[in-house]
Image: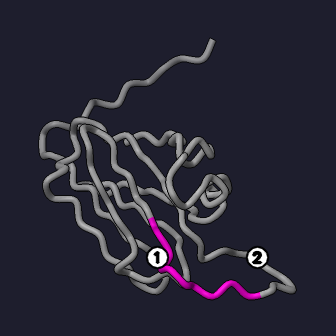
């Protein structure tokens, strides 16, 4: 599984909510990924979000995770602000060995947990590359 910064995450989004929502999207949802014997497990750190406002889509070999805050979400006059509950878009390129029909997701304790199962026997062999 490979990650690349999507056009939306770079701020090149011209959607109805405006570019400002996506310019800082990399700061709004940190992602950790680890591998098990049967899957890649992705942890999207998104505290204070509403489960129903997450969207996960697979198109071709790209997984896009989007969060859109509800309309009328209160925006206080912050005195100090260290994290945001705003919207974000993250896009990941999936290897051919990911079983896209069986991807699952759940939102638990502020973390969106996405499981990307590996197709048995289709994993690419490890290749060592010498540094010269």
In the picture of the structure, the residue carrying the numbered disc 1 is 111
Task: Check disc 2: other Cα within 10 Å, few if <14, some if 14-19, many if 20+.
Answer: few
**Percent x, y for residue 41?**
36, 61
Residue plotted at (63% across, 88% down): 74
Mark 1 or 2, closer to the camera: 2
The residues bearing labels 1 and 2 have C-alpha atoms spaced at a distance of 17 Å
Q: Quick one: SS at disc 2?
A: loop
**Image location of residue 27, percent across then percent down:** 66, 60
Determine if the magenta segment contains residue 70.
yes
Q: Is residue 65 left or right of residue 76?
A: left
118 in magenta = no
The picture places residue 22, in percent across and down from the top left corner, at 60, 55
Q: Where does label 2 land, which residue?
A: 82
Q: Is residue 77 left or right of residue 24?
A: right
Q: Return the mark for residue 38.
A: none
**Residue bounds of the magenta highlight:** 67-76
Residue at the image position 62 percent from the left and 65 percent from the top: 28
């Amino acid at each position: 599984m490979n990650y690349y910064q999507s056009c939306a995450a770079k701020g090149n989004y011209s959607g109805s909510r405006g570019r400002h929502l996506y310019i800082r999207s990399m700061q709004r949802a940190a992602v950790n990924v680890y591998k098990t014997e049967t899957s890649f497990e992705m942890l999207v750190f998104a505290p204070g979000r509403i489960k129903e406002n997450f969207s996960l889509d697979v198109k071709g070999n790209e997984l896009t995770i989007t969060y859109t805050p509800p309309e009328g979400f209160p925006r206080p006059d912050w005195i100090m602000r260290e994290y945001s509950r705003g919207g974000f878009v993250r896009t990941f390129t999936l290897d051919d060995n990911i079983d896209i029909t069986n991807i699952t997701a759940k939102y638990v304790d502020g973390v969106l947990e996405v499981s990307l199962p590996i197709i048995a026997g289709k994993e690419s062999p490890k290749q060592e590359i010498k540094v010269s």
